[in-house]
Image (cartoon, rainbow, N blue to C red):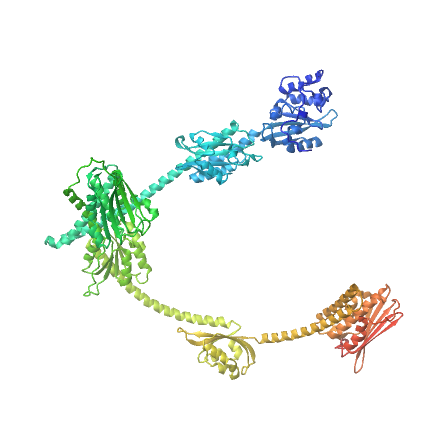
C-alpha cells in the first residue's frame, strides 16, 4: 500500500461525532463512564466502514465490550479498511491522534509506524498466529515532533460470527521510559566509574567526552569548558567542529553560555543558529542545548558543560534530571582529577624539597669541613712544634684565621636564612646614601677582579633622595651579587650600576660569564638549588646565597629579577628598592659605619682571592726520584695547605679543577692523584672515569679528599674505582700515611702486572704455537676432503703444502711432493703451459685460466687453475696458493653437446624443408582454403606421428610395421590387413614412407575403399633376396567404388611416384583397377638404411 505519513487526519476522514438518533444499540454497547464510551455513543458509526452498531456481528460487539472494560491499552482493527476501536488506556498512547483516530483507518493514525507494524498485523490476519514483541521501537508523531518511543505489543486474530478472521486485537504497553532510563543509567554508571579513576584533569575531560559520546541518542554533541586564568577554554568535546569550539571560547560569548557561571543550568533555545548538527534516533536537526555548571570545591563554578538535547525527546522533568545528574558526575570527575593533581604536585614538591635539603646538607658539610681542615691542620702543626716565636707560624695562623672568617660568614648566612624562613627577621630601615654605600661595597672586589684579567665598572650616580633600607641587608645583597658574578665570570667584564626610576632605586649587577640556561632562570632563586654542570671558578657553595638575597630584597619591599640570553652569554641581576618620601630621610651614615662595612666585606673578598689560580713551582731537580703527586682542589687555601704538607716528601703539582688535573695527568703521568670530589668544570668522579678510560693513566692510584663522611660516601668512591677515600678534616700524618700506602700498593701491583705480562707472553707464545699446529692439522684435514688440488708454492717454485688429492693426481706420496720443484713434478712440457701465469702470480696478480696439460708420465687433462699471491707481513710476495680442478669431463660433455646441436640443427633444417614442401603443395592451385588447410594439417600430423615414433628409438631407426600401423591408426585399424617381416628403417626413409602411406590413406578415405562401409585395405611387404636386396611394399584396396586414373596428378601421387623414387632411389607404380587402387613401392634396402631384423 502507499506510504501514508500525514501528521493530522485529513478532513475527509475526520468523522462526525454526532450520531443519528434512533440507534439504541450504540447507546447500549458504549454504555458506562469513560471518554471512549462517551465518544462511542455520540459517533455516527454508519458513516464508518463498520456501519451502524446494530449491524455489527455479535463477535465484534463482544470484542468491543472486552476492550472497553480493560484497563490495559488495547486496540481492535476490523475489516479490510483496518477501522480501529480502542479504549481509554490506549488513547493516551497516541497523543494528539485521539479522538480523530476512533473509527478511522489505523494505517493513517499510525502512518509513521506502519512500516514496522503493518507486516506484523497483516501476517497475524493472514495466518491466524498471534505474536508478541517486547520493547519494539516505533516512530511516533503524537506530540508535534518525531518521537523516539518503545512499546511491548501483542497481536491476536479477531474472528467474525462465521469463524473468519476479520480483524486484529492488539494489547500494548509503552516502555519508553524504561528503555531510555536504562540507557541513561548506564551512562551515569560509566561517568561515576571514570570520576572515581580520574587522575589528571586533561585525561578526565577526555574520558568524560568518551563516555558521553557513547550515548548519542540522548546527547548528540557536548563540550566541556574549564576556567583558566584567561577565561573559558574547551578541555574536551565531541560532535563539534573546531571553529564552533572557538566560538564557545570567544570573549564575546555568542552562545550566551557565560550565564551559567552563576551556578545554574539553563537551556540554549536557538543552538541551531550557531551549529548545524543532526542527531537523536532519527538524525533530525538539533535545535536546543542545555548548559550545566561544573562545580568545584565550595561550589565554585570551575567550568561549563554544554550538551545537545535530542530532537526526538521532549525536555521533560526526567530528561532535565538526567542532565543534572550528568553535570554532577562531571563535576565530581573534574574535582577528583584536580585534587589528585594537587596531591601529585604536593608530593613532587615535597620530594623536590627533600632532594634539595639532602643536596644542601651535603654542600654545607663540604663548606664546613674544608675550612675546619684548614683551621685544625695549621693549629695542630703549631702545637706539635717546639715553642718558638709567633712569626714562625704566621702563615699557618693567617690560613686558620682566614678560614675561621669564612666559617663565620657561612654560619651567619645560615642563621639569616633560618630566621627569614621562620619569619623572625624584619628589616630595620634607616636613611642611607645608597650611591656611596654601593661604590664602597663594590670597590672591595676591584683588586681581585682586575687580578683575574676582567674589566670592572662601577656606575652609581647620587640619587635625588636618600633611600630607607636596612643597611646590613643591603650590604649582603651587594656582596653576594658581586661575589656571584666574579665566581661565574672567567673572561670579559663585570658591571655594577645604580640608577633611579619613579620612586625606586635600581641596582643592576651584570657580567659576561657562564650565563644561565632559559629553563633554569626560574630556579636561580629556589632554595638549595644549584645549576648542574655550570662553569665557575669554584664548585663550593651552599645553594642558599641567591635565595637569601631574594628574601632580603622582599623584606625591604623590593623585587629582584634574573636575566640571561643563555649559557655562555652572561647574566644580569636587577634589584628594585623603594625610595623614601622627600623630607623623611636623615643624613647619610658616617665613616665609622663604613669601616664596619669593609670588615664585613673582607670575608667575601678573601674568599674571592682564593678562587684565582696560582702557578705551581717547578719540580725540584735535586730530588728527581721522589714520587710525583698531582693535587686537584678548587679551594686555593686547601691546595696551598696540602702542598705545604707534602712538599718535603713528594714532588707536588696542583690543579684548580678536574679538567686541568686531567690535562696534567695525561702530560706528566704522576705516581698518584689526590683529588677533591666537588670541583668546577670536571668533578672528582668525572676525573676518575677519564683516568680509568685512558690506557695511559688507568693504573695511576687515586685518593679522594672529600667533605662527604660516612660509610656510604666511602663505598661510593671505592665502587667508582678510587683507591682510597679520606674525609675532611684530616691530620697531616694520616694524609701522608694514606698516600704512602697507596704508592706501595701501586708498586706491588706494578711488579705483579710485570710478572703477569711475562707469564702471559710465554703462555701466548705456547698457545700460538699450539694454535698454529692445530690450524695446520685442521687445514690439512679440510683440504684433503675437497675434490680439488690445493697447493702452496714459494718463490723458489717449490711445493710447501699440498692436499691429499695430489697423491692420486701425480701418483706420488705427499712427502715426496712437498719440497720438490713444480717443474720436476709435472714435466717440462706441462710447466711451459703455466709458467707465464706463475710469473704473473709472483708479481702480485690473481690469475684464473683454463688449459690442456700434457703431463709427463700421467694422463693429459683439461684443468681450471686459480693462482692467488701470498703476501708477507711487509706486503711482499712470498709465494702463491694454487687451486687446480680437473675439467676433462666437462670439456668432453661440451664437445658432445656441440655435436648434438649440430645434429639437431641438421634435422630441424630437413624437417623444415619437408614442411615447406608440404605447405607449398597443399595450398597450390585453385583448391578451397578449408580443403587446403585440412590437407595441410593432416600431412603435418602424419609428419609429427613419424617424428614421435623415431623419438621413441632415439632417432636411430623405426620398424616398418610400426610406421604402417602409426599411419593407418587414424583411419581405423580394423579395416586394414598388415603383414610383412621385421624391417628397421633409418629416419629419413621412415618419414618418407609415413608421408606416402598418409596420402594413400587419405585418398582411400575420400575416393577409395575406405569411403564405403565394406571396403578394406591390405598393406604387405617382403624382401627380395640377392646381392642387392630390395624391399617391396604393396598397397591394395578391396570392395571400394570403381576408381579411374585422374586427369592430372595431385601432390599425393607425385609424393608417392616421384618423391619416393628420388628420396629412396626406388620406384613406385600405381594402377587403377575396378576393384580398387593398387600401389607397389620398390627400393633398395641399402637406401632405406634398413636391415632385416628378423634375421639379425
Quarter that holds the N terminus: top right
Q: Position of residue 808 (x, y in %)?
A: 53, 77
420 in relation to 984, above or below: above
User: At 14% from the left edge and 43% from the top edge, which residue is drawn?
Assistant: 591
Identity of the residue furthest to the bottom in this view:
828
Q: Position of residue 994 (x, y in %)?
A: 77, 71
- Which residue occupies the foreground of this view, 667 or 797? 667
Relative to 1004, 571 lies left or right: left
Q: Position of residue 312 (x, y in %)?
A: 56, 32
Q: Can residue 961 be seen by looking at this rendering?
A: no
- Which residue occupies the foreground of this view, 310 or 948? 310
Q: Can residue 99 be seen by looking at this rendering?
A: yes
- Which residue occupies the foreground of this view, 739 or 231? 231
1083 in relation to 78, above or below: below
Q: Position of residue 684 (x, y in %)?
A: 29, 54
Report which quarter residue 962 is drawn in.
Answer: bottom right
Relative to 708, 598 lies left or right: left
Q: How many marks?
A: 0
Report which quarter residue 471 is drawn in.
Answer: top left
User: At 49% from the left edge and 70% from the top edge, which residue is drawn?
Assistant: 782
469 in relation to 381, above or below: above
Quarter that holds the C terminus: bottom right
Amino acid at each position: 500500500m502507499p506510504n501514508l505519513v500525514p501528521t493530522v487526519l485529513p478532513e475527509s476522514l475526520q468523522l462526525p461525532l454526532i450520531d443519528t438518533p434512533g440507534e439504541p444499540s450504540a447507546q447500549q454497547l458504549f454504555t458506562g463512564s469513560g471518554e471512549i464510551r462517551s465518544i462511542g455513543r455520540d459517533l455516527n458509526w454508519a458513516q464508518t466502514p463498520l456501519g451502524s452498531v446494530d449491524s455489527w456481528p455479535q463477535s465484534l460487539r463482544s470484542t468491543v465490550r472486552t476492550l472497553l472494560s480493560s484497563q490495559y491499552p488495547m486496540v481492535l482493527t476490523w475489516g479490510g479498511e483496518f477501522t480501529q476501536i480502542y479504549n481509554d488506556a490506549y488513547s493516551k498512547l497516541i497523543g494528539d491522534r485521539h479522538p480523530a483516530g476512533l473509527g478511522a483507518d489505523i494505517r493513517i493514525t499510525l502512518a509513521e509506524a506502519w512500516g514496522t507494524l503493518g507486516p506484523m498485523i497483516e501476517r497475524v490476519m493472514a495466518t491466524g498466529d498471534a505474536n508478541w514483541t517486547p520493547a519494539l521501537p516505533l516512530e511516533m508523531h503524537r506530540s508535534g515532533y518525531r518521537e523516539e518511543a518503545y512499546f511491548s505489543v501483542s497481536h491476536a486474530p479477531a474472528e467474525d460470527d462465521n469463524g473468519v478472521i476479520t480483524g486484529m486485537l492488539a494489547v500494548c504497553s509503552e516502555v519508553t521510559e524504561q528503555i531510555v532510563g536504562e540507557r541513561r543509567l548506564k551512562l551515569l554508571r560509566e561517568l561515576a566509574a571514570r570520576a572515581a579513576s580520574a587522575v589528571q584533569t586533561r585525561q578526565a575531560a577526555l574520558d568524560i567526552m568518551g563516555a558521553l559520546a557513547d550515548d548519542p541518542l540522548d546527547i548528540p554533541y557536548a563540550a566541556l569548558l574549564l576556567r583558566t586564568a584567561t577565561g573559558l577554554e574547551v578541555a574536551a568535546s565531541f560532535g563539534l567542529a573546531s571553529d564552533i569550539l572557538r566560538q564557545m571560547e570567544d570573549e564575546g560569548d555568542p552562545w550566551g553560555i557565560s550565564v551559567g557561571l552563576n551556578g545554574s543550568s539553563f537551556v540554549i533555545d536557538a543552538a541551531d543558529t550557531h551549529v548545524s548538527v543532526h542527531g537523536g534516533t532519527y538524525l533530525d536537526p538539533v535545535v536546543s542545548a542545555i548548559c550545566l555548571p561544573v562545580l568545584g570545591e565550595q561550589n565554585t563554578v570551575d567550568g561549563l558543560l554544554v550538551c545537545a538535547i535530542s530532537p526526538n525527546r521532549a525536555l521533560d522533568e526526567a530528561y532535565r534530571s538526567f542532565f543534572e545528574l550528568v553535570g554532577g558526575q562531571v563535576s565530581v570527575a573534574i574535582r577528583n582529577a584536580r585534587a589528585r593533581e594537587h596531591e601529585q604536585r604536593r608530593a613532587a614538591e615535597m620530594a623536590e624539597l627533600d632532594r634539595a635539603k639532602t643536596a644542601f646538607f651535603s654542600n654545607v658539610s663540604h663548606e664546613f669541613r674544608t675550612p675546619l681542615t684548614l683551621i685544625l691542620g695549621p693549629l695542630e702543626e703549631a702545637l706539635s712544634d717546639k715553642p718558638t716565636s709567633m712569626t714562625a707560624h704566621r702563615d699557618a695562623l693567617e690560613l686558620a684565621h682566614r678560614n675561621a672568617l669564612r666559617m663565620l660568614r657561612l654560619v651567619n648566612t645560615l642563621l639569616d636564612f633560618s630566621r627569614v624562613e621562620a619569619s623572625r627577621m624584619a628589616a630595620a630601615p634607616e636613611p642611607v646614601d645608597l650611591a656611596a654605600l654601593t661604590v664602597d661595597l663594590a670597590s672591595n672586589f676591584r683588586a681581585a677582579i682586575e687580578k683575574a684579567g676582567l674589566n670592572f665598572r662601577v656606575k652609581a650616580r647620587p640619587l635625588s633622595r636618600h633611600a630607607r633600607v636596612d643597611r646590613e641587608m643591603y650590604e649582603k645583597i651587594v656582596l653576594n651579587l658581586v661575589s656571584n658574578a666574579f665566581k661565574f665570570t672567567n673572561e670579559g667584564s663585570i658591571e655594577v650600576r645604580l640608577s633611579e626610576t619613579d620612586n625606586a632605586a635600581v641596582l643592576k649587577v651584570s657580567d659576561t660569564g657562564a650565563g644561565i640556561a632559559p629553563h633554569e632562570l626560574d630556579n636561580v632563586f629556589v632554595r638549595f638549588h644549584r645549576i648542574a654542570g655550570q662553569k665557575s671558578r669554584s664548585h663550593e657553595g651552599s645553594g642558599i646565597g641567591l635565595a637569601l638575597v631574594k628574601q632580603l630584597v622582599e623584606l625591604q619591599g623590593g623585587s629582584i629579577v634574573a636575566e640571561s640570553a643563555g649559557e655562555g652569554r652572561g647574566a644580569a641581576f636587577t634589584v628594585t628598592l623603594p625610595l623614601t618620601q622627600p623630607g623623611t630621610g636623615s643624613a647619610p651614615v658616617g665613616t665609622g659605619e663604613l669601616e664596619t662595612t669593609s670588615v664585613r666585606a673582607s670575608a667575601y673578598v678573601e674568599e674571592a682571592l682564593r678562587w684565582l689560580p696560582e702557578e705551581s713551582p717547578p719540580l725540584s731537580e735535586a730530588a728527581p726520584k721522589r714520587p710525583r703527586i698531582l693535587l686537584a682542589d678548587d679551594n686555593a687555601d686547601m691546595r696551598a695547605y696540602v702542598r705545604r704538607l707534602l712538599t718535603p716528601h713528594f714532588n707536588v703539582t696542583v690543579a684548580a679543577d678536574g679538567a686541568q688535573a686531567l690535562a696534567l695527568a695525561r702530560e706528566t703521568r704522576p705516581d698518584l692523584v689526590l683529588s677533591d670530589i666537588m670541583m668546577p668544570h670536571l668533578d672528582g668522579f668525572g676525573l676518575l672515569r677519564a683516568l680509568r678510560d685512558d690506557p695511559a693513566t688507568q693504573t695511576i692510584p687515586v685518593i679522594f679528599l672529600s667533605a662527604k663522611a660516612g660509610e656510604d660516601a666511602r663505598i661510593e668512591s671505592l665502587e667508582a674505582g678510587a683507591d682510597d677515600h679520606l674525609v675532611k678534616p684530616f691530620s697531616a700524618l694520616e694524609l701522608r700515611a694514606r698516600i704512602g700506602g697507596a704508592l706501595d700498593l701501586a708498586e706491588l701491583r706494578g711488579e705483579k702486572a710485570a710478572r703477569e705480562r711475562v707469564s702471559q707472553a710465554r703462555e701466548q707464545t705456547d698457545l700460538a704455537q699450539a694454535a698454529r699446529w692445530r690450524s695446520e692439522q685442521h687445514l690439512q684435514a679440510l683440504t684433503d676432503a675437497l675434490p680439488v688440488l690445493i697447493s702452496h708454492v714459494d718463490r723458489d717454485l717449490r711445493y710447501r703444502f699440498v692436499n691429499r688429492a695430489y697423491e692420486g693426481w701425480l701418483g706420488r706420496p705427499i712427502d715426496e711432493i712437498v719440497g720438490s720443484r713444480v717443474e720436476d713434478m709435472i714435466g717440462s712440457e706441462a710447466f711451459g703451459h703455466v709458467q707465464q701465469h706463475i710469473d704473473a702470480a709472483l708479481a702480485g696478480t690473481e690469475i684464473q685460466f683454463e688449459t690442456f696439460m700434457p703431463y709427463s708420465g700421467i694422463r693429459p687433462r683439461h684443468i681450471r687453475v686459480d693462482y692467488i699471491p701470498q703476501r708477507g707481513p711487509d706486503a711482499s710476495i712470498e709465494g702463491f696458493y694454487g687451486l687446480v680442478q680437473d675439467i676433462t669431463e666437462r670439456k668432453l660433455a661440451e664437445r658432445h653437446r656441440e655435436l648434438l646441436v649440430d645434429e639437431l640443427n641438421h634435422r630441424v633444417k630437413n624437417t623444415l624443408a619437408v614442411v615447406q614442401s608440404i605447405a607449398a603443395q597443399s595450398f597450390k592451385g585453385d583448391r578451397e582454403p578449408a580443403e587446403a588447410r585440412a590437407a595441410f594439417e593432416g600431412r603435418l600430423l602424419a609428419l609429427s606421428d613419424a617424428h614421435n615414433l623415431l623419438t621413441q628409438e632415439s632417432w636411430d631407426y623405426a620398424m616398418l610395421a610400426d610406421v604402417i600401423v602409426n599411419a593407418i591408426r587414424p583411419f581405423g585399424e580394423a579395416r586394414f590387413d598388415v603383414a610383412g617381416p621385421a624391417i628397421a628403417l633409418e629416419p629419413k626413409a621412415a618419414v618418407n614412407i609415413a608421408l606416402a602411406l598418409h596420402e594413400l590413406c587419405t585418398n582411400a578415405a575420400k575416393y577409395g575403399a575406405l569411403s564405403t562401409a565394406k571396403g578394406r585395405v591390405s598393406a604387405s611387404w617382403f624382401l627380395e633376396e640377392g646381392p642387392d636386396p630390395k624391399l617391396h611394399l604393396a598397397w591394395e584396396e578391396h570392395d571400394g567404388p570403381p576408381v579411374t586414373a585422374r586427369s592430372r596428378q595431385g601432390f599425393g601421387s607425385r609424393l608417392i611416384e616421384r618423391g619416393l623414387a628420388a628420396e629412396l632411389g626406388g620406384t613406385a607404380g600405381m594402377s587403377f583397377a575396378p576393384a580398387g587402387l593398387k600401389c607397389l613401392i620398390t627400393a633398395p634396402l641399402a637406401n632405406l638404411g634398413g636391415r632385416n631384423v628378423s634375421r639379425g
